[in-house]
Amino acid sequence: MSGDYQLVPLANGAQTLFSARYGEKMHPGLGPAAEAELLYVQQLQISERLETHAGEFVIWDVGLGAAANALAVLHATREISGQCRLISFDDTGEPLEFALKNGGALGYLSGYQQQISELLRQNRVEFENGKLKVKWEFLLGDFPAFLSNLKLTTDNLKPPAPHAIFYDAFSPARNPAMWTLPVFENLFRALDPARPCALTTYSRSTLLRTTLLLAGFFVGVGQATGMKEETTVAANDLRLLVEPLNARWLERARRSDSAEPLCEPVYARAPLSPATAEKLRRHPQFEVSS
């Protein structure tokens, strides 16, 4: 291992991982277990949707990291009879390997060490999680490149379209390649229009929300988590949003000094261009809310 990761304590006593490469902590607000449960599992109503879902429920876990988000799903859904397919994406397995070696301090890996070890060895594992049947896959590689190449991939080799997306990459300032408009356009194209899908992420930035809207998503306000007063939820179906962005947000976006999407993997702050402002004004979400 490279030595990139280390354990650091948070104000509430929880331990989390710090990446020297990116200069950021994972789940820095409430800690891995609590933040993953609140932001990803509860916010997207994973348990409730699983209980009423027929067939395989597919989650794309973008930014596997130390697997806090994926394990939050497993801890929350043990008593649900159904099928869940977790597809995790990351360009490295190092943080999960580090977390596995430090499972006692982190706590949330308890009960799943064997499955995690197999996932790291084989890039896939199938098991009974209480009443829930789970298929967990790890697609190791560059996520933007994966999305870009999807159109060239034969249907039988493509992963199934998701019902839910956890988007948990390092921040746009530190990892801009994961937050560009082309990435989210390709992600939106990967969805099945007939399959309602919701995405959640920790950021509330105007830049991100503008990017999601221009990519084709409907976008809404997400709940607070620790250090953040709001997060962001996006969906291909407006009915999945509890609090969609409205015309007042659009006015604030026009005044923001950091709202123009990143078209290249280089972080930059810029106000909306006139062309982008016009595209936002014509988005169906604001036609509905006006």
Image (cartoon, rainbow, N blue to C red):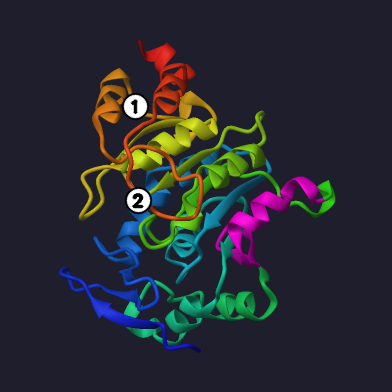
Q: Amino acid at mark 2?
A: Tyr
* Left or right: where 259 falls relative to 192: left
Give how far across and how far down residue 126 sits, in percent: 67, 67
Q: Quadrant of residue 131?
A: bottom right
Of the numbered discs in the image, which one, if any, rests on residue 42?
none
Residue drawn 43% across and 12% down?
Answer: 287
Q: Earlier in the sequence, mark 2 or mark 1?
A: 2
Give how far across and how far down residue 133 sits, in percent: 64, 58
Give how far across and how far down residue 26 sits, in percent: 35, 67
Q: Quadrant of residue 174?
A: bottom left
130 magenta-colored: yes
* Left or right: where 144 falls relative to 8: right
Q: Secondary structure at mark 2?
A: loop
Mark 1 neighbour class, 10 Å CA radius: few under 14, some 14 to 19, many 20 or more: some
Quadrant where the C terminus lies?
A: top left
- Segment colored magenta: 126-153
Q: Secondary structure at mark 1?
A: loop
Of the numbered discs in the image, which one, if any, rests on residue 245?
1
Residue drawn 39% across and 30% down?
Answer: 273
Mark 2 neighbour class, 10 Å CA radius: few under 14, some 14 to 19, many 20 or more: many
Residue 204 can be seen, yes or no:
yes
> Label 2, label 1: how many angstroms apart (C-alpha)?
16 Å
Above or below residue 268? Residue 102 is below
Residue found at the very far left of the displayed protein: 11
* Left or right: where 122 falls relative to 114: right
Residue drawn 45% across and 38% down?
Answer: 211
Q: Amino acid at mark 1?
A: Leu
Residue under label 2? 202
Give how far across and how far down residue 57 sits, in percent: 62, 46
